[in-house]
Amino acid sequence: MKWQLAETAKDLAAYIRSLDEDLAEPPPAGAVVTAPALSRAGKTAKAAAVTPAPAAEPATSPAPLMPSKKTASMDELAEQVKACRRCGLGSARLNAVFGVGSRKAKVVFVGEGPGFQEDHKGEPFVGRSGQLLDKILETVLGLKRSDVYIANIVKCHPMKNPSDPESHGNDRPPTPDEIAACRPYLDEQLRAIKPDCIVTLGSVPTKVLLNTDKGISLMRGRAYDYPVEIVPGRPVKLIPTYHPAALLRNPNLKRDTWEDMKMLKVFLETGKIS
Ligand code: URA
C-alpha cells in the first residue's frame, strides 16, 4: 500500500514536471491559444483556482441525437465534410478539420472546434494545446496521437470575422445551430470507429455529448454512459476532462486532469471504471 502511494506520487510528480516544461514556454509571438472554450473554463471543484471567464457560456442547446440508417465509411464522411455547406462555417474556413488518428482506436478525444492553426493545417489539436494533449497522452497513457482518434464537435473554424481567416484572435465559440448542423458527422465517425470510450475536452463537447447544461468542473471526475447507442447492447463510456488549453491558463488543473486520465488508463487496461 505504502509502495503504491509512493509510486503514485512519483508518477504524478513526473507528469507535472513534464507538463511544466510546456507550461513554462511563453506562447509564440502572435499565437493564439485556439480553443474558444478556454475563456469559459469554470472553477475546479477541488482547486477552485480557474480564473472565471468574462465570456458567457454559449447556449449550447442540446443537439438532436441523430439515428442513422446507414453507416458511411470514414473516407466518404471526410469527403462530405470537405464539401459541407450545412452552415456558414463551411464557406469561411480554409480547411475542414475532419479528425486524425486510428480508425480502430479504443478512445476518441473530442474537442470544441478548430482554431487558427487547425484551420491552416486541416488537423485537430496542432497548436500549443494540441502539443500539451500529446504530452498528456504520452506521459499518463503511454499513447501516441496515432493510437487514439481526435476530433471536434464542429469541423470548421468558427471565426468572429469570417472574411479574415489569416488574423489571429479571430476565434469564437460555435453557435447552437452550427453545432446541430455538424453533430451528425461526429455521430457517424463514432459509429465507424466504435470506441470503448470517449473523452470530452472542456465544457462545450461535454455539454453537447451528455446533453447537459452543467460545465466541465461539475461534470468531470467520473465516467458516464454515452447516451447514443453506437454498438447495440454495448454502452460507450464517456470521461469528461479539462481542455488542455485550460491547463495552459491554469496549471492547477493538471492534477484533476491526471486523475481523469488515470481513470481512462485503468478503463482501457481492465474494462473497469475505478
Ligand atoms: N481546440 C479545440 O477544441 N480543438 C482543436 O482542434 C484545437 C483547439
Image: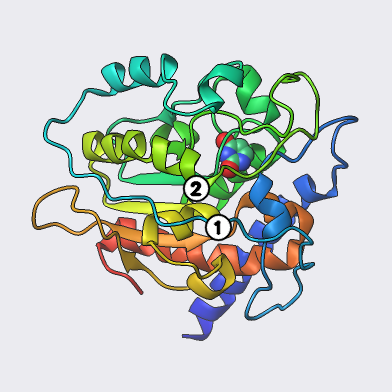
* Residue at figure coordinates x 62%, y 73% from the top left: 9
Question: Pointer 1 and pointer 2: residues touching (CB < 8 Å)?
Answer: yes
* Residue at figure coordinates x 27%, y 45% from the top left: 195
Colour logic = rainbow
Mark sitting earlier along the chain (1/2): 1
Q: Quadrant of residue 202?
A: bottom right
**Residue beneath label 2, please?**
176
Of residues 181 and 168, the one nearer the viewer is: 181
Q: Is the residue 181 above or below the residue 79 in the image?
A: below
Residue 178 in sight here: yes
Q: Is the residue 54 above or below the residue 109 in the image?
A: below
* Residue at figure coordinates x 65%, y 74% from the top left: 44
Of residues 184 and 31, the one nearer the viewer is: 184
- The mark found on residue 33 in the picture is none
Lateral position of residue 33 relative to residue 134, left or right = right
Which quarter of the image is occupied by the C terminus? bottom left
Where is ligand 1, by quadrant? top right
**Residue beneath label 1, please?**
59
Q: Inspect the image, locate mark 2, and give the three-letter code of the amino acid beneath it.
A: Pro
Determine the CA span between mark 1 and mark 2: 7 Å
Q: Inspect the image, locate mark 1, and give the three-letter code of the amino acid beneath it.
A: Ala
